[in-house]
Image (spheres, rainbow, N blue to C red):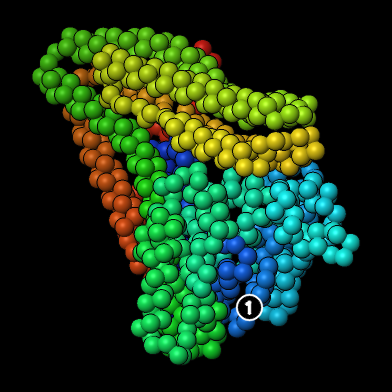
Amino acid sequence: MDTSRPLATQFEAYSRWRQHLSAAVGELHQWLKLQNLADSQTSQAVSQIRTRLNEDKLVLAFVAEFSRGKSELINAIFFSGYGQRLLPSTAGRTTMCPTELLYDPALPPSLRLLPIETRLQRTSVTDLKSVPQEWMTVPLDITSPEQMSQVLQRVSQVKFVPLDLANQYGFFDNEEDIAAAIKNHSGEVEIPCWRHAMINFPHPMLQQGLVILDTPGLNAIGTEPELTLSLLPSAHGVLFILAADAGVTKTDLDVWQQYLVSSDPASKSGHIVVLNKIDGLWDELKTLQAVEAELASQVKNTADTLDISASQIFPLSAQKGLLAKITGDKTLLARSRLPELERALTDRIIPARREIVGDTTRADVHALVLNARAILDTREDSISEQLDQLLALRNKNQDVVLRLLDQTKEEKIKFEHGMARYTAMRRIFTNLTNALLDAAGTEALRLNANRTHLALEASSQTRSVRSAINHFFVSINEDMAQAEFQAKEIYEMVSAMSSRFSKELRMKPFAPARFSFEKYKKELSRLHGAYQQRFEALWGSTTRARLQPMQRFFEAIVTRAKHIYGVANRDAESWLKGVMIPLETQIRERHQQLRKRQDRARQMSLVSSEAEGHSRELREQFAEVQQQQSELDKFIARIDTLMTQQDFGGDSSPADNAAPTLKATPNPKTTEIDADPFDLSTIWPEKNPAASG
């Protein structure tokens, strides 16, 4: 592969940036553990951050009607280094089923094909991906481009079946489609052999996390609902391919309006439109200026029709670009205008994805640092308070020392009373947590979906079908509303407890993070809108004979909803485990410091001359905490710098460009935090007396 191309170079830089960022987060975690500033929740949070960085995917979706040169464009951008076409690209229909190109090192290089017959099942493609026996697997010989090209031709395979069977598979929704269908001498209609294809291939960019989604034309998009409900909306970049000589046809406009911008009109500003096959406008009998004027006119007309900016439209010739790359013809490559599209992908999609990943990582890392800083602040305050008391004891008599001992005992009693209130709050927190996770849990969704499936099977009229599915959406909206209510209750309870403890126990006040279900509700609303549009367009007069495609479409809705619930549940669990951490870490730290003060007070009651030695020890601890604060500042500054750093070099490892690693030794004067704040057995005083002091 020619890695000198801007797109490949930028993607490699993005991959290295994620590696460096992951390594920096790992080093921060090691330092936190050495300083006894990390607990099990910190370790879990770090693991989640690093997993997200290491497994991040960037999905590019290529969408077009048939014969627009979509597969040829993919060949030109990604596979020219193999000296020939890998994806089938000939006149007529080539990609007959949705095809994903990716790399999973756990699987051998192969083409996996899901038979079209699986459409008779209620199982979605997403669920079938975890059922290997349902797929036909064909090995790929990565040393032989010819063999790979031959194997990949299978994605274009078709067969003829009776019209009734094709209808059961979800094809040919109206008389117009049936009339246009390709038929054999027996009157059977042509359909794809495969429902979905996955190409597992160790291409350098695929190895670094790129996923390419190659979609079929309008008819196939409409009959595989997961494309419109899940795959296309989750893509980080969408390239919509048109033919320059034809402009925007009716079917092109249908694809654009129905599947790319219908659910979110604002999304069209981020789509890239390709006017392919500009070589069809090249004419030796016309001047270059005349050809350019004709092309400019097509760009303007396309922008007006799609209601987008002309800057989003890229006229090019994928075929000439591929040929130029294979033959090394720089003049032809420039004339093909393919490099302009590659620069657009470099300048738009990858930086946008990097910004999203960076913002998420920065927020998560700052949350870790905030927790560590709260512990250090508590240590610093406690040491300062003890120093002040020791200074006041200079040249004082034994009575003053005894009063200090009494004062420490009173603080211990006050702390234990606070722990009693905390225990009661923890029980309420547990109940609210269970209620939240139950409301946003997949079990509630499963029961709701099963009820809807039964209702669909018993339905025979449009009204009853519509009512069943609408009730499904009403139920999931109620689930999210209930979960949101519980999250608000938890937030208000933790805020009130933090305020109370700051006054009564002189702990640092903190504002707990809020948790919003708004983004999950918006995604469910988009799902509802996609269903309503599809229902009106195709099933305005649904009968029992057409319930099978309806059930398959509903199963795709359930699969997408299951994903949304899963993400909401995971994010809520992460928030629930973190929302109490600042309070819990301060409680633990306060307990440790209080116990140390008791020990010192008892020692001083016996030998008041030891005050100077204790004072010296506290000053050393105070200096150590300040050094830890400084080192923590350096770590966060380093990670913030990595967020904006662009160039890491071609062959460097994360350590090559990292800031000097901060050396630290374990702190023997502090007690390691090893309790899990979310484990009730380590929090409830009645189950663990040590927790209450």
Q: Nearer the viewer, residue 7 or 244?
A: 244
Extreme residue in the left direction: 395
State the residue at coordinates (37%, 9%).
417
Q: Nearer the viewer, residue 129 or 91?
A: 91
Element at label 1 = loop
Q: Quadrant of residue 138?
A: bottom right
Quadrant in which the N terminus is drawn? bottom right
Q: Position of residue 377 (x, y in %)?
A: 27, 32
- The answer to whether residue 187 is left or right of residue 587 is right
Query: Three-letter amino acid code at disc 1?
Result: Arg
Q: Quadrant of residue 531?
A: top right
* Vertical side of 79 occupied by 180: above or below: above
Visible in this render: residue 43?
A: no
Residue that badge 1 annotates: 85
State the residue at coordinates (18%, 21%).
389
Q: Nearer the viewer, residue 91 or 133?
A: 91
* Vertical side of 541 occupied by 334: above or below: below
- The answer to whether residue 383 is left or right of residue 70 is left
Q: Position of residue 364 (x, y in %)?
A: 40, 42
Extreme residue in the right direction: 186
